[in-house]
Amino acid sequence: MTLKPTLKIKRDFTRIDAGKIDVLSGLSVGWISDALDRSAALPAHISPITRNTVFTGSALTVATKANDNLAIYAALSIAKAGDVLVIAIDPEDISSTPCSLCGDILAGFAKNAGISAIVTNGMVRDRIGLDAVGLPVFAAGLTPNAPFKEGPGSCGLPVKIGRKIISSGDIICGDDDGVIHVAQADFAATLDGLKTVAAKEEAMDAALKAGYRQPDWLEERLAEDDIDFIEAPDLPTLKSS
């Protein structure tokens, strides 16, 4: 009889070069998302839990149940300095009560293992303690419920969060606006896109400093045929219910 494995752990995967991570470090996640066709963000409900929010690192992916963190602890055994723990739960899993997947103790172990941030579409707890640990933590929310350590789960294998398929070794960035994902294969396109974004932002900043009240493209856009200006006599009459 073959036992079904409790955990599946992929120890070896290709992390993106640290120099490439440095290139994106400190940039606004909004800029990076703009460079990737405005579509790099993880779901908006994954928001900052800690005061510290800024990070850039290589994804170390974990899949687990909404009430279990055995796989997360297992991931610490293969973590390398600079990794970002990306913890995915299946939002359709209603077989378990949502619990905290990470508190200040696990975060403390993660920091000691070199982890640079924790991102999950599940829940966490111990906000004050997490702030004391110092790692940026992004999650779907807070709950005092404690998790189990029974599995099943995986580490190092691709996970899905929202519409994003995230592989270990991809780039994950965060700041106050949220979290974005850059696949390794998209790095070159990201750099090209950032050149365009930077030029656009520079032009907009110059217009603001010059006192412009609207962007230069707006007047032309409002003159197009699909824009209908309603004059006062044509205002519709609204009836109250």
Image (spheres, grey):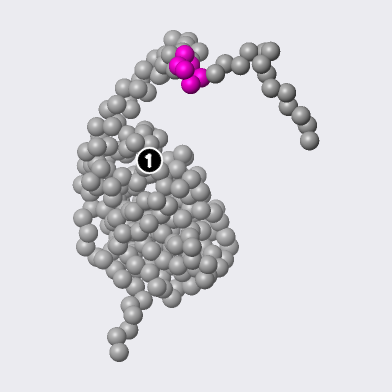
Residue at image position (38%, 36%) is 38
The secondary structure that most of the magenta stretch takes on is loop
Residue 120 is left or right of residue 84, and the answer is right
Q: Can you see residue 26?
A: no
- Asked if the stretch drawn in magenta spans residue 226, the answer is yes
* Location of the N terminus (image quadrant): bottom left
Which is more toward the observer, 37 or 128? 37
Q: Residue furthest right?
A: 241
When asked about the image quadrant of residue 158, the answer is bottom left
Of residues 231 and 2, the one nearer the viewer is: 231
Q: Name the residue under label 1.
A: 39
Residue reaching furthest to the bottom? 1
x%, y% of residue 149? 44, 73
Instruction: Reply yes or no: does residue 183 show up in magenta.
Output: no
User: At which x and y percent is residue 171?
Assistant: 30, 47
Q: Quadrant of the C terminus?
A: top right
Estimate how packed mark 1 is, as few (under 14), some (14 to 19) or many (20 or more) residues with alpha carbons within 10 Å: some
Is 26 situated above or below 143?
above
Q: In this view, does 111 lie above or below 214?
A: below
Q: In which quarter of the image is residue 209?
A: top left
Range drawn in magenta: 222-227
Say which element carries label 1: loop
Residue drawn where x is 23% and y is 53% of the image: 15
Which residue type carries mark 1?
Ser
Q: Is residue 234 above or below residue 46?
A: above
